[in-house]
Image (cartoon, rainbow, N blue to C red):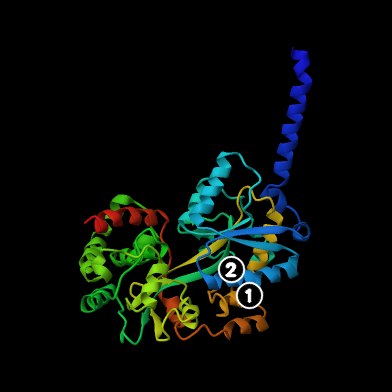
Amino acid sequence: MKTFYFPIILASLLIISACSQEEAASSIDDITAQSWADIEAESEGTEVRLYMWGGDEGINQYIDEWLQPQLEDEYGVELERIPMETEEILQKLQTEQQAGKQEGTIDIIWLNGENFKTAKDNDLLAGSFVDVLPNFNEYYQTDDPAFSTDFGTDVDGMEAPWGKVQFVFHYDSEKVKQPPSSFAELKQWISENPGEFTYPNAEDFTGNAFLRHLLYEQTEQPSDIYSEPFEADEVNEKAEGMWTYLNEIEPDLWRSGDHYPNSLTELDRLYGEGEVSMTMGYNEARAEKLIDEGTFPDSTKSFVMEPGSIGNTHFLSIPFNSTNKEGALAAINYMLSPEAQLSKLKQDYWGENTPISYEKLPDSMREEFEKVERGDSVLDQQELEESFLPESEADYVEWIEDYWFDEIVQE
């Protein structure tokens, strides 16, 4: 019996060993140990699948109409954009991980914040790779804290900075002659203009950010939140004034607070149709495209309030079971290039700010960036920089989601 099964056992062990060697050969560590020229050569002629939120038509057009053809010309890489909510992407990866599926269908993910923390904590990412990207090393401040942490979670080289945004409020200047400069002034304006303001619920990314601004305002200084590790007892104490504020403005909100928009898209629709006079969101230039499309009125402007404007970096990462990590690296490197970032900055498609370092650019390219007109609705860059506030730890996001429902919805 033992003699009969020994060759079979031996063969099985050899197969397992071969599979292990094949898996090891495709690990991100082994791939990044190669020269960049070899990585580029391996990527040529391959398909890269980019899974990302698809709710913004301008962003989608940037990917489909500008980035895809450029990648094909630059690397011979065919980029396929698959729209999917980030939470669903991570759930897909977790399901594949639990099933032991080492050959996945996702090569690049667009993510940040609590989604990055979830991905990192659950080993859903391939590992560290940004140090090998030529464009990152040449054109970015690699030691920038905005690139080393993501909502308080250490990045550890697992994601590459693709863009940066700041939170602003948008308003119809025909209806609002002087926008509020603080939450106290906002409260007064809401009282004097009942039904013309609301915010998305706390489960929405934008609505949660609005609430984090208000939480920052409850402290002596915002750093009491964003520079401190999350401690539920301390946050509960600091947040008492936030819940009081929200309950006091609720009767004067749109629909008297009986319904909060489920998404920024819903709030934007209310604003575009004139039911409310303000909307809000990350990306200080996002209104320009909506104005051009006729979704927002031409009289749309933007403003920030004390204590400041929360900004963050968003990133590109590679999942643990990508079958084309070389192609993913080549695509991400190009997406960080001056050419790709310049196109993304322009209002033609996206109009989003860039994490690239102007001082590292060649003079001619820096001039191209500096002469980009971002639009009349976009605040002056100096005002944005002076109002910038870092994000807090991702734990604050989930805490606000839970407590907002108890303190506001059920009250």
Give the amino acid type for the residue marked by disc 1 in the picture: Lys
Asked whether disc 2 touches disc 1, contact meaning CB atoms under 8 Å apart, the reply is yes
Residue in the image at 30% along x and 79% along y = 180
- Indicate the secondary structure of the residue bearing disc 1: helix
Give the quarter of the image for residue 304. Answer: bottom left
**Nearer to us in this view, 295 or 183:** 295
**x and y percent of residue 209 in the render?**
38, 65
The three-letter amino acid code for the residue at tag 2 is Gln
Q: Is residue 263 above or below residue 371?
A: above
Q: Residue at x 40, y 73 (%)?
A: 268
Residue under label 2? 141
Report x, y in % for residue 390. Answer: 43, 66
Q: Quadrant of the C terminus?
A: bottom left
Please name the residue that numbered disc 1 is placed on. 360
Q: Is residue 388 visible?
A: no
Where residue 13 is drawn, which disc sits there?
Answer: none
How busy is the neighbourhood of tag 2: few (under 14 within 10 Å), some, or many (20 plus)?
some
Spot occupied by residue 73 in the image (x, y as percentages of width and height): 75, 70
Any part of residue 78 in sight = yes
Q: x, y (%) of residue 169?
A: 38, 75
